[in-house]
Image (cartoon, rainbow, N blue to C red):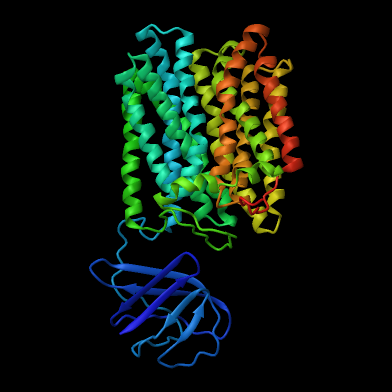
């Protein structure tokens, strides 16, 4: 009988008794990387494979070992265990089904979270396509159609802070799955409520609320699970799902509407979200690594108090949030203003570029629709490059704050320069202007390795609440900026003054604010500050 106790610092503890099981590792007299296999055979086969650094302290060939292996402690190795001079053994049954069984749990959660963001933007853009046949069927004018579309942003703006607060209390994983279920169910109900305006507006507000809590939930999940050296790639992979979702939604919605009717996009896209909800619960049931607890992998997080996951703490937890300390921080104000500036350019272009392509560049509706897909499509490729670029700089020893400033500066100056070139009459043909704007907007995805990583950098504990604060302000351009652009267009009849000039101003001023005050240094927020 042998007793194995596995300790992985602050995030894992397992004690298990086995019968006739062996622990095999290679013997060496120097520090080197070894592979250790612990296999337990039973009806519910468990398998642990640990890669660690082994520093032996004159271990003799005896029947017992008491050795600390990079946080892994092995006790009371029974007499059946032997040390092999070379190679390694695996004892027990090693089932490889399901195929994702041996993938680290944090990668599974990041992958499914990115998929949730794909569905998120599919449900966001489906109405922008379906609004045309819906307006014809129900006799809506432009004002009514605008009301229906803008109702999403009311729910989106109102749910940012509650989403961050709830993510901190219950964990981003739980909040995310509830958010996905809420917006998916509300999406599927749109065809039933389309003829009743209050119900339709309410359903779109619910879609906004469900999608509004998701960024904070994902930020909390990343802050708890992902170490600093992997954070840029994790954030880019998760939030990059938004661009992929925009492309997928814009590609699928037109043929679905043409062949199955406008109702089909709401039924099908809503069903995808509900299916994701079921799959995510199944995934979490298979491994309880993330259950709302604070988990730090390969990095030390200074915490004065643990994350709260009990419903009993809900009442007092809001008072425990160091709101004053947040708003005394220059770095937080830099994030708030930068988020507002980036959202202004993003939301106004998302809403008005198709019209700009059609009216100003004289592209037909089909061409304008296809061209509108190019910026998010290009963003998918830029996102992966930016993430690798940022993580490589951090791994090579460049200060995290410097890396975040570089990435965010690229994200703002690139579209500012491209919009300036597009607004000046240089005699360029339409497709060259499309290419310039596509390149500039695609490079704005560097923000995923800049601003969107800073919340986790400065405070993993309060990352979700910080994103809730900045995203609340960032939702304002979706309500005000889009409407103001239309008003300026009617007043000036100039795309340069109505669409590009305000965005250029916010991109440049946001860059100045970011370079002056942004910081990724961990900050210890407390109510006593």
* Residue 406 appears in the picture as rendered: no
Q: Residue at x 36, y 55 (%)?
A: 100
Using the image as rendered, state which of residue 170 and residue 56 is in the foreground: 170
Q: Position of residue 515 (x, y in %)?
A: 75, 41
Q: Looking at the image, which residue is at 43% across and 86% down?
A: 84
Q: 176 or 420: which is nearer to us?
A: 176
Compared to 77, does 349 lie above or below? above
- Does 515 sit above or below residue 147? below
Count of picture labels = 0
**Residue 134: x, y in percent?**
37, 13
492 sits left or right of 84 in the view: right
Position in image of residue 50 (x %, y %): 45, 70
Asked if residue 80 can be seen in this view, the reply is yes
Is 455 rendered above or below residue 360?
below
In the foreground, 112 or 421: 112
Q: Residue at x 61, y 44 (%)?
A: 449
State which quadrant residue 323 falls in: top right
In the drawing, does residue 9 fall left or right of residue 265?
A: right
Residue 453 vs 243, above or below: the answer is below
In depth, the one of 52 and 462 nearer the eye is: 462
Q: Quadrant of residue 496?
A: top right
Where does the image place residue 71, in percent across and percent down from the top left? 51, 73
Query: Which residue is situated farthest in the left direction here?
Result: 43
Specify whether 247 is left or right of 383: left
């Amino acid at each position: 009988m042998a007793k194995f106790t596995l300790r992985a610092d602050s995030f894992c503890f397992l004690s298990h008794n086995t019968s006739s099981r062996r622990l095999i590792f290679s013997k060496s007299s120097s520090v080197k990387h070894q592979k250790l296999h612990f296999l337990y055979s039973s009806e519910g086969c468990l398998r642990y494979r640990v890669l660690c650094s082994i520093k032996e302290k004159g271990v003799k060939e005896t029947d017992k070992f008491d050795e600390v292996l990079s946080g892994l402690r092995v006790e009371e190795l029974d007499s059946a265990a032997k040390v092999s001079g070379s190679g390694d053994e695996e004892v027990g049954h090693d089932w490889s089904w399901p195929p994702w069984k041996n993938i680290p749990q944090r990668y599974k959660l990041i992958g499914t979270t990115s998929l949730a963001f794909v569905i998120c933007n599919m449900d966001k853009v489906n109405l922008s396509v379906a609004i045309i046949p819906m307006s014809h069927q129900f006799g809506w004018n432009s004002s009514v159609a605008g009301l229906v579309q803008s109702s999403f942003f009311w729910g989106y703006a109102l749910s940012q802070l509650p989403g961050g607060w709830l993510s901190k209390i219950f964990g981003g994983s739980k909040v995310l799955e509830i958010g996905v279920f809420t917006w998916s169910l509300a999406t599927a109900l749109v065809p039933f409520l389309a003829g009743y305006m209050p119900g339709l507006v309410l359903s779109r507000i619910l879609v906004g609320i469900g999608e509004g809590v998701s960024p904070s939930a994902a930020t909390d999940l990343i802050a708890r699970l992902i170490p600093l050296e992997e954070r840029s790639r994790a954030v880019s992979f998760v939030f990059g799902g938004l661009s992929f979702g925009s492309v997928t939604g814009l590609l699928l919605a037109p043929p679905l509407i043409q062949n199955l009717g406008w109702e089909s996009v709401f039924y099908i896209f809503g069903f995808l979200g509900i299916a994701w909800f079921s799959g995510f619960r199944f995934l979490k049931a298979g491994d309880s690594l993330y259950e709302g607890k604070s988990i730090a992998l390969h990095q030390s997080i200074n915490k004065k108090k643990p994350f709260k996951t009990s419903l009993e703490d809900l009442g007092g937890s809001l008072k425990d949030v160091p709101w004053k300390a947040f708003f005394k921080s220059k770095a937080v104000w830099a994030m708030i203003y930068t988020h507002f500036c980036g959202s202004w350019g993003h939301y106004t272009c998302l809403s008005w570029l198709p019209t700009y392509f059609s009216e100003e560049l004289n592209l037909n509706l089909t061409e304008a629709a296809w061209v509108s897909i190019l910026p998010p499509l290009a963003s998918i490729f830029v996102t992966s490059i930016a993430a690798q670029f940022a993580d490589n700089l951090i791994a090579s020893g460049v200060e995290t704050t410097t890396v975040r400033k570089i990435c965010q500066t690229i994200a703002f100056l690139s579209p500012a320069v491209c919009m300036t070139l597009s607004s000046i009459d240089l005699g360029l043909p339409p497709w060259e202007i499309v290419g310039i704007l596509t390149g500039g907007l695609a490079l704005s995805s560097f923000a995923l390795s800049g601003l969107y990583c800073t919340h986790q950098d400065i405070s993993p504990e309060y990352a979700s609440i910080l994103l809730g604060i900045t995203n609340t302000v960032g939702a304002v351009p979706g309500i005000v900026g889009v409407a103001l652009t239309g008003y300026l267009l009617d007043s000036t009849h100039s795309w340069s003054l109505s669409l590009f000039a305000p965005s250029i101003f916010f991109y440049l001023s946001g860059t100045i604010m970011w370079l002056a005050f942004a910081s990724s240094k961990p900050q210890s927020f407390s109510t006593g500050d």
